Image (tube, rainbow, N blue to C red):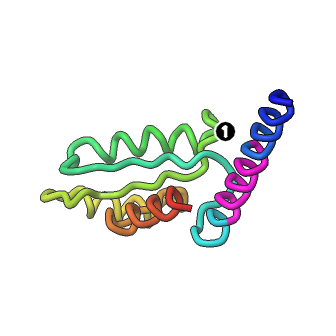
Amino acid sequence: MSTFIINAIIWTLAIYGLFEIIKNIIFTYTYTNLKADGIYMIIAVKNQENKIEVFLRSILFRILYGKDEYIRNVIVTDLNSKDNTKEILEKLSKDYKCIEVVEWKEFKETMENINNV
């Protein structure tokens, strides 16, 4: 009898977990603009004007020339830099479609919404 109860509890938790996973997937596709076409690389930067362009171009090289077939998009959020980091990011995002620049507040809200579902 105790084996039956334990198995019933385990199956109930497994089904509940499956529903939670399905709910998270539906929420992600419905309420965010993330697509399931590869890996999203998320980068947070602050005051990196001397390094960010070289860093992103090295990632772009891997994406554009087939060195990394899994990374599809790069999401960069600026943490209120006091230098020209944001301007460099905006320029690169205009030149390359796979780079998306988002505000920290918008990024944080998106991640909190995904985690709270």
The residue closer to the viewer here, 114 or 46, is 114
Where in the figure is residue 73, as x and y percent of width and height?
A: 55, 52
Is 108 on the left-hand or right-hand side of 51? right
Q: Is residue 22 magenta?
A: yes
Identity of the residue drawn at 66% across and 39% down: 69
In the rendered image, the residue lying farthest to the front is 1
SS at circle 1:
loop
Where in the figure is residue 76, as x and y percent of width and height?
A: 39, 55
The N terminus lies in quadrant:
top right
In the rendered image, the residue lying farthest to the bottom is 31
Numbered range of the magenta stretch: 14-26
What residue would you read off at disc 1?
69
Is 92 on the left-hand or right-hand side of 15? left
Is 11 on the left-hand or right-hand side of 103? right
Where in the figure is residue 60, as x and y percent of width and height?
A: 50, 45
For badge 1, the amino acid type reads: Glu
The residue closer to the viewer here, 74 or 107, is 107
Identity of the residue drawn at 36% across and 40% down: 55
Type of secondary structure dominating the magenta stretch: helix
In the rendered image, the residue lying farthest to the left is 82
